[in-house]
Image (spheres, rainbow, N blue to C red):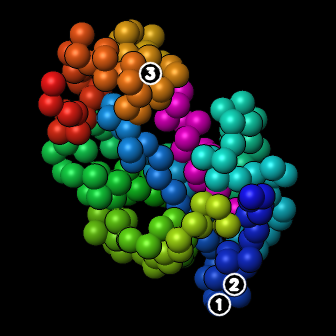
Amino acid sequence: MAVSDPTLAVESQLLVDGHRYVIGCDEVGRGAIAGPVAVGVALIDSASGEFPPGLRDSKLLSEKRREILSPLATVWARFTAVGLASAAEVDSLGLSAALGLAGKRALIHLHDAGAPVGQSIVLLDGSFDWLTPALSSPLQVHTRVKADRDCASVAAASVIAKVHRDRLMIDADAAVPGYGWASNKGYGSAGHFTAITELGATDWHRRTWLKPA
């Protein structure tokens, strides 16, 4: 079944409704057993223009296509950023709180770069708002199921976050070899679980997520 390309229909309606800026927001790494969770954000406005051709949710793109599209999406959006929460923070805080922390850090990066975060509405993928509880100064948050598939700003955030996290895991594989992170990116492949059994867990692993031996 063919997958339709994202559009700016939702973002355009939010702008028409009176919001000056829209921040597309999506997470990656939720289901991994090693490495951080990452939250990408991409701020656009009415002057942002057409998004890069071929832009889609990162899960629908090959690694090669994501690498090509990430810099194009970064140029297209007015501001972009990625925030991280470590494996240890996922263990200690729980997944939802760790996602919120990563999202907060991404928004701080935007603010520090001069983005008008306080004048923006966040378009968040999914039905559950895990972001607001982490913010000391709450923003307006609009949740939408499949926003990463349907909304270009969220697709851009998804691709940017995925490429950022994948590169971290490739670097981690070089520093801590044996777990196949360059290929599995920290997800629970059979080879990854075998390596944990043979080599033990590392500080990169979400220890509370590992199955008993």
Question: What's the magenta region?
Answer: 152-169
Give the answer, above or below, for where 79 lies relative to 134. above
- Ranked by sequence position, the earlier of labels 2 and 3 is 2
Residue denoted by label 3: 181
Residue denoted by label 1: 17
Label 1 sits on a secondary structure element that is loop
The label nearer to you, 2 versus 1, is 2
Q: Residue at x 52, y 22 (%)?
A: 183
Does residue 183 appear to the left or right of 202 in the view shown? Answer: right
Q: Give the amino acid type for the residue marked by disc 1 in the picture.
A: Asp
Neighbor class of circle 2 (other Cα within 10 Å; few <14, some 14-19, many 20+) is: few
> Where does the image place residue 36, in percent across and percent down from the top left?
36, 37
Does residue 196 appear to the left or right of 123 in the view shown? Answer: left
Residue denoted by label 2: 13
Q: CA distance from mark 1 to mark 3?
A: 44 Å
Residue 176 appears in the figure: yes
> Where does the image place residue 181, in percent across and percent down from the top left?
44, 21
Q: Quadrant of residue 173?
A: top left
